[in-house]
Amino acid sequence: MSHEVTTHPVPEAFASQANLTPEKYREMYSASIDDPEAFWGEHGKRIKWMTPYTKVKDVSWNRDDLHVRWFSDGTLNVTESCLDRHLETRADKPAIIWEGDDPEDSHTLTYRQMYHAVCRFSNVLKEMGVKKGDRVTIYMPMIVEAAMAMLACARIGAVHSVVFGGFSPEALAGRITDCESKFVITADEGVRGGRIVPLKVNCDKACDLANGMVEKVLVVRRTGNDVDMKAGRDLWLHEIGADVADTCPPEPMNAEDPLFILYTSGSTGKPKGVLHTCGGYLVWASMTHEYVFDLKEDDVFWCSADVGWVTGHTYIVYGPLANGATSVMFEGVPTYPSASRFWEACDKHGVTIFYTAPTAIRALMREGDEPVKSTDRSSLRLLGTVGEPINPEAWEWYFKVVGEERCPIVDTWWQTETGGTMIVPLPGTSEMKPGAGSHPFFGVQPKLVDAEGHELRGATEGNLIITDSWPGQMRTVYGDHQRFIETYFSAYPGNYFTGDGCRRDEDGFYWITGRVDDVINVSGHRMGTAEVESALVSHDAVAEAAVVGYPHDIKGQGIYAYVTTVAEVEPSDELKSELVRHVRSEIGPIASPDLIQFSSGLPKTRSGKIMRRILRKIAEDSFDNLGDTSTLAEPEVVEQLIEGRQNRK
Ligand code: WT7
């Protein structure tokens, strides 16, 4: 296999103004590894503390005593860093520029306005009975009230759990009950790509499914269309927010008090509630935001993610606001009303840094250069990507057509669990290799290992582990510390296992190759194959199902489902559509199978284990070399599967 790539030097105009140089990076990186206590002791001060910490790092990755604590005797409220402290020097600076789904619709909130809005929102939550430590589920469209709701929770010490607005009522209910959330914040409806998303209707269904768990629902008016309001439970924000005070004292929190829970898919079971705490997370969010994006005071920073994902938490809300930056929040989709939308909005708001996902780049690349070239984009100086490996073709297009070879590209590798960027070509510090995650951020110690845990040195490929803690690391799986230990610290004891494969080249650049577990990455969103399987088998017609990923031109990976029907049911195209609808209603549209193959059986070992390796090969349409099939219970099943394969090239 050849890994020939064209490398690009850092564009000169960029390099001359970059915050970092190659030397500075090396110096800071060494300092962060040689003496983490001193390094983080210093950089922890970048956020505002109520009581300064004296302890910096208190971590054990030993399975019997696993704990992760940073700055653990400090107290703070993260909203003081994100809002109050900017009032002195940045009160009139835009904090959030909101760009609506309709290109005619946008507005700006200054730091002063945002501060008062969050204070009012905090007082509303208090009136609803939300107390410190309570979990509050946020199921919202991309409107500024979503960011306000998060910050209002943080201000009063409540723990937010944002659930992406594209998830189904079933998925929402599961997340509400898992963290025993008595409060939900939602909107009447969302608007995306000109279409209405019935959030309140979904929320009502979820509340029913959650069996009396939800006591109060706060509803934000977005479209103004009629929705049912349940007396005694549902409240309009504009009604109860009408006469609350516009200041609210920030609740003092310990650095290790929970800030938020965010559910993410794993290789087994139901989604895990990833828990992040106040101090370390905010230090990591703000520090990575500043260095990864070469942040300057006048930047207009646009991260196109949804706040329902960790990218939105860290790089729309917490990182930018902690840094006093201007953050763009976009309600719509990249292709509405046209494929020029991103670039037109960049021109409209003078965006200088733009951060999106490879799947969006590929979808836009397919529309050709014209929708890009018809826009100006001269404000842009840095581009970023996140969520999945970016193929060199998409990288080159982004670099040449969108950024006109003027803007470096930061390809940021990280995870919900890591809180912020971990591996990245920090802008200005090294030449760029399209598709390479490149180098570790300060304090990050990556290692490549084989299946047995032996370290692989030099230019090689293996499983990616991290050998020591960093401040933004998740602290536990909410309500299930044992699962935290099993998931991340049992494959390679004493180390954090990422679940990703990775290659290191001759020059020491890291290249993430994708998940090595049963997690697939669909349009930059993580989906557990087990979750889709259990949604499928919950349908009466399905006896058994196995789900794998396969290469997909736009989505990165598509979802390929092998389905065995129960004896009474004949496979049919109608049943396929019915199963797609069923999965959408169980999980959400992002889990829709792209291809379904009916099969009379699945390849299993004699002990009954499904041989997924074979299923992946067939789904990829590359079945010439299926590897060792000698342990198959019924080898003829494989022939039938190849015969009926759905992804023929
Ligand atoms: C998984 C984490 C990080 C926020 C968005 C996704 C994959 C993420 C990259 C990248 C190659 C990437 C990994 C990782 N991934 N960024 N730049 N290059 N792969 O967060 O949902 O927690 O998913 O996304 O496989 O493990 P997530």
Image (cartoon, rainbow, N blue to C red):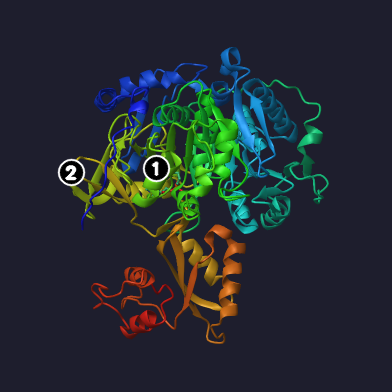
Residue matched to label 1: 400
Among numbered discs 1 and 2, the one appearing first in the sequence: 1
Secondary element at image label 2: loop
Q: Residue 230: horizontal and vertical position, in percent?
A: 81, 49
Q: Residue 353: horizontal and vertical position, in percent?
A: 48, 33
Q: Is residue 572 visible?
A: yes
Decide: few, some or many residues near mark 2? Use Cα within 10 Å; few <14, some 14-19, many ≥20: few
Please identify the quarter of the rendering in which residue 406 is found. Answer: top left
Left or right: residue 248 versus residue 357 is: right
Q: Residue at x 68, y 48 (%)?
A: 191
Q: Which mark is residue 260?
A: none
Q: Is residue 539 visible?
A: no
Q: Residue 287: horizontal and vertical position, in percent?
A: 42, 27
- Number of marks in the rendered image: 2
Task: Assign the C terminus to one quadrant of the image.
Answer: bottom left
Left or right: residue 218 versus residue 37 is: right
* Above or below for 81 versus 452: above
Decide: few, some or many residues near mark 1? Use Cα within 10 Å; few <14, some 14-19, many ≥20: few
Q: Amino acid at mark 1?
A: Lys
Q: Nearer the viewer, residue 74 or 510?
A: 510
Residue at the extreme left of the image, as rendered: 458
Q: Amino acid at mark 2?
A: Glu
Q: Residue at x 36, y 26 (%)?
A: 13
Q: Nearer the viewer, residue 195 or 227?
A: 195
Residue matched to label 2: 506
Q: Which callout, 1 or 2, points to the residue nearer the camera?
A: 1
Secondary element at image label 1: helix
